[in-house]
Image (cartoon, rainbow, N blue to C red):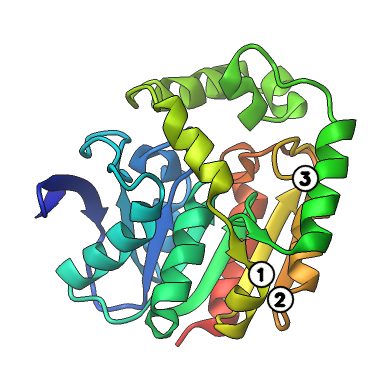
Amino acid sequence: MAFMESDGFRLYYEDSGGDAPTVLFLHGAGGNHLSWWQQVPVFAEEYRCITLDQRGFGRSSGVSEQGPVSLATDALVLLDHLGVTRAALVTQSMGGWAAAGAVLKSAGRFWSVVMANTVGNLINPEIAALRQRLAAASPPRPPVLWHAALGPTFRKAEPARSFLYASIAGLNAPLPPAFREAMQRLTTPVERYAAASVTTLFLSSDEDGLIWPELSEKVHSHVPGSEFVRISGAGHSTYFERPDVWNREVGAFLKAHRP
């Protein structure tokens, strides 16, 4: 348990240590470093695992005046602070925005990226048109916002773990509406990401009503050399809802590309 202090802000992180290849986990807007409680004990057997509270979440400082743009820079600064020259990025939802920005800034720092239930707002006209069609065909988001992050199968079958998810999310300070609005405006041309040539896995699930599996698959088709996995019976938080399958698929991907 430690804090990194840089330019007037504090970033909370946890580091399993060791000299194995590094994996940096980047949580979504409904999470923080605790979100990965079902992943770190598994992946730490083979990798150096680093989790953090991104800025504005958990025990870290509030959001930057630069908004979500700062998330990518924070990830790179943390790796520098820890002396990590290369890492894999494993992300969920909002974490994909940080990963996309970090790859564009310093592609050589990353040996793999996992975009789980996220496309990092990678965009081109074809992707934007599909997103618009999917959004128009989707039901309104539920009044309890965290319900949108969990699939109906999980919420019905796992009320205790659904409560745990909400409790972890509740440790975060309320996210300013301006931050969420800035996230939607923060896009990355998919061709620029593809040109970085960082091996990427796009992982989605059948019940994700925020980043639809069709959208993830479409973005995958525009990133040559990327891989795509679709998991059944889970919503937007597959890592939390079906950790056994998620860990297996992500573990196989990382193993195949381990430096």
Instruction: Determine the residue positioned at 69% across, 61% down.
Output: 123
Left or right: 171, with 239 as reference point: left
At numbered mark 1, what does the secondary structure look like: helix, strand or loop? helix
Instruction: Determine the residue positioned at 45% across, 46% down.
Output: 27
Question: Disc 3 residue type?
Answer: Trp
Q: In the rendered picture of this protein, how many numbered marks are placed on residues?
A: 3
Image: 102 above or below 137: below
Of pointers 3 and 1, the one earlier in the residue sequence: 1
Of pointers 2 and 1, the one earlier in the residue sequence: 1
Q: In this view of the protein, can residue 207 be seen by the observer?
A: yes
Of pointers 2 and 3, the one earlier in the residue sequence: 3
Res. 64 image quadrant: top left
The answer to whether mark 3 and mark 1 are in CB contact below 8 A is: no
According to the image, label 2 marks what residue?
A: 223
Left or right: 74, with 205 as reference point: left
Question: Disc 2 residue type?
Answer: Val
Question: Could you tell me how far apart the alpha carbons at marks 2 and 1 are, in whole angstroms?
Answer: 7 Å
Res. 144 image quadrant: top right
Image: 156 above or below 71: above
According to the image, label 3 marks what residue?
A: 212
Q: In this view of the protein, can residue 93 be seen by the observer?
A: no
Instruction: Determine the residue positioned at 46% across, 26% down.
Output: 177
Question: Could you tell me how far apart the alpha carbons at marks 2 and 3 are, in whole angstroms?
Answer: 17 Å
The answer to whether mark 2 and mark 1 are in CB contact below 8 A is: yes
Res. 212 image quadrant: top right
According to the image, label 1 marks what residue?
A: 190
Q: Position of residue 71 (x, y in %)?
A: 36, 53
